[in-house]
Image (spheres, grey):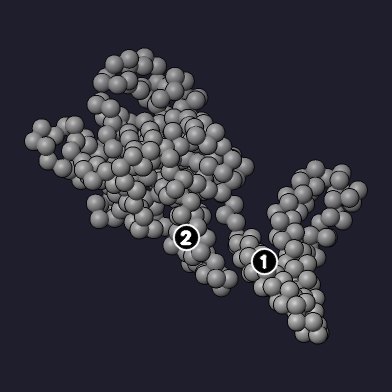
Amino acid sequence: MLEKLAGIEARYEELNKLMSNPDVIGDYNRLRAVGQERSELEPIVETFRQFEAVQKELEGARGLAEASGDAEMAAMAREEIARLEQQSREIKERIKRLLLPRDPADDKSAIVEIRAGTGGEEAGLFAANLYRMYTRYAEARGWSAEMLSANDTGIGGFKEVIFLVKGKGAYSRFKFESGVHRVQRIPVTESSGRIHTSTATVAVLPEVEDVEVQIPDKDIEIEVYRSAGAGGQNVQKNSTAVRIRHLPSGMVVQCQDERSQLQNKMRAMSILRARLYDMERSKRDQEITDARRSQVGSAERSEKIRTYNFPQARVTDHRIDKSVFGPRMQAMLDGELDEFIDELATQDQAERLQAVGLA
């Protein structure tokens, strides 16, 4: 690890020199690339230099403890050694985390897709609950939530809802919500008072720019049609809804919520780019990790990442075996998700450290 860190430090110094090179300064794209690489290496180099400084102090303290003929001075040196060894271990752990390959999508905005699973109309109502929970979470973190597409049930639920969470780093948090969410409660549609179990699936994709995923015109087939409002009301007289089929993959995306055909096309293309980008990431990462496999399974009740049990006022995340109860459950449904997401991020980090042999 020390050899790797020394190599990173040498590259960092090389980048510093390039930043003042007239040829680089005159080339905006190259200057930007050099600056970005430098900023990514800077925290690693700074932490490595802290580690080296502590190691130097530690060496001096050990030498003093061995050479001192004064018992009191030797005792003070041993205390200093203990403090510096602890500091050294903490810095080394920070270095390990910094050396982990960053997910390039972590800084991106997130496209969140929620679909009703098993459970009929109750599953649609639960999908609406999740939509509310996520939009409140986004707002609390200063991000905006923008509806991209929705197919409602007519009674306040969603068969499917897709929205964009716009903000730096949104994907790094929302990606831990991918999977099957299960709810256990008495539905408002249930007259006999029986507890039902229903599911909704959540998929989270990083938003991507046109330059990151280019889709040739020959690869898509665009169909326009008239969109209808809730319950068949407010039927559009013009064909503003858009359905896009990606011919190589067979993927279909449709949007009808905007008033203009152009806006619906732009939103549908945004969703398509995100899905294609995620599909390519999945292929690339499949050999080294299962984390980018299909995010939502088959939506069966047994394939769940989290259970929301209303009779027991309990939410349990099965990946980290963590539950919250009572008022904390309601707080979570109101968007206070960090308690779960922080632990999921910590677990993910630990697994990745182990996978690359740094644990």
The x, y position of residue 235, in whole percent, is: 32, 16
Nearer to us: label 2 or label 1: 1
Q: Which residue is mark 2?
A: 347
Residue under the image location 89 percent in, 51 percent down: 21
Element class at badge 2: helix
The residue located at (80%, 47%) in the rendering is 31
Residue 73 visible here? yes
Secondary structure at badge 1 equals: helix
Q: Nearer the viewer, residue 208 or 346?
A: 346
Of residues 252 and 19, the one drawn nearer to the viewer in this rendering:
19
* Location of the N terminus (image quadrant): bottom right
The answer to whether residue 296 of the structure is visible from this angle is no
Taking 158 as reference, is 264 left or right? right
Q: Which residue is mark 1?
A: 87
Up the image or down, 333 lies above or below 89; here it is above
Q: For this view, does 294 lie left or right of residue 14? A: left
Where does the image place residue 313, in percent across and percent down from the top left? 27, 43
Q: Earlier in the sequence, mark 2 or mark 1?
A: 1
Dividing the picture into quarters, in which one does residue 78 lie?
bottom right
| Residue type indicated by callout 1 | Gln
- Residue at 47% x, 20% y is 260
Instruction: Say if mark 2 contacts mark 1, CB within 8 Å.
Output: no
- Whole-percent x and y of residue 288? 50, 67
**Circle 1 Cα neighbour tier, 10 Å, few/some/many (<14 / 14–19 / ≥20):** some
Q: Label 2: how many residues lie within 10 Å, few (<14), some (14-19) or many (20+)?
A: some
Rendered location of residue 92, percent (x, y):
65, 67
21 lies above or below 224: below
Q: Amino acid at mark 2?
A: Gln
Drawn side of residue 31 relative to residue 105, left or right: right
Q: Residue at x 52, y 60 (%)?
A: 349
Say which of 319 and 208 sits in front: 319
